[in-house]
Image: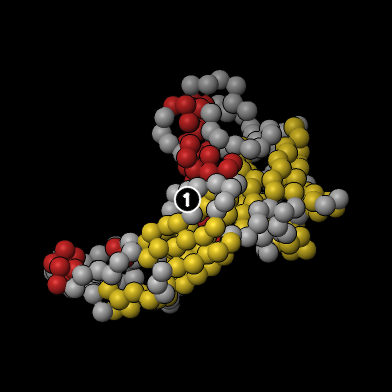
Amino acid sequence: MKNTFAFLSLIISFVFITSCKKDITQPGFSDIPVIQSFLQVGSPASVNISKQIAFDPNAIYSSDNVNTLNITISTNGTSYTLTPMGNGNYVDSSLIITDTLQYSLQFNYNGKFVTATTKALSKPVGFAQSATVVSIAQVAVGSSSSSTYSSSPLPAPIVFSWTNNDNSYYIVSVENTTQNPALIDLNNANEPARLFRSSPTQDNNFQLNPRQFQYYGMHKVTLYHILPGYADLYISNGTSSQNLATPQTNITNGYGIFTAMNSVVLYVNVLKL
């Protein structure tokens, strides 16, 4: 899950760090915390707290230490105090996220009560795939992919499907899990990312084009059932002045996101033709 949460966090980092650039021309910078919390059903609760990066040299920060806050999450009538782990990370291994339950985040920062609420979603239903194995020819050094695939055509796209009767939002991530996997295109001088993902969708299917694979080996395909708030944040990630001045958030007296998701996994093995 570490790599998956990394790509989720990148969206948060871009929106809320770049939004702080507006403070250069906006006097009265207010030290408001940035929260990143993606509660995964079946996993312990975790939260990351960070400070904004103000590009105004005259910005005044509060004395609050992001590593010594009293972070609590409440659910089903019980409140849990999370343990600080350093670098703004807080966890509680005794609080395992359960689907359909509501979770509330609370803590004090800079004299204000920071709060957020989310609900753990149900597990995706009916996740299926049209193929479990694909064979792709390796592109040799000095050759082009077009010439290679003209003589050894790529297989048809793999179709992943699921049940979505209520127009929920989903994200599909694909991660190579093979240790030291071989490159498909040997002309790729830079090491490509081993994980890629779709945009949020309300469809009930996703087509994975074989050209999207960068490596041979086993790939974990994860279908995430996500809340509209996370989809809105993803969609609002842009460079317009409106997005930078008013970043999407579901936190009261804070920026960022406090959300929950549920997932199921399938696998695809990419073989050398």
At which x and y percent is residue 23?
A: 52, 26
* Residue 85 in sight in this render: no
Locate the C terminus and report the quarter of the image it occupies.
bottom left
Q: Secondary structure at mark 1?
A: loop
**Which residue is disc 1 drawn over?**
203
Residue placed at 41% from the left, 74% from the top? 132
Question: Does residue 159 appear left or right of residue 211 in this picture?
Answer: right
Q: Residue furthest right?
A: 77
Q: Quadrant of residue 241?
A: top left
- The colour mode here is secondary structure
Question: Does residue 13 appear left or right of residue 258 in this picture?
Answer: left
Q: Quadrant of residue 134?
A: bottom left
Name which residue type carries label 1: Asp
Out of 62 and 212, give the one closest to the viewer.
212
At which x and y percent is residue 27?
A: 56, 20
Q: Is residue 126 above or below residue 36?
A: below
How many neighbours does mark 1 have within 10 angstroms: few (below 14), some (14-19), or many (20 or more)?
A: some
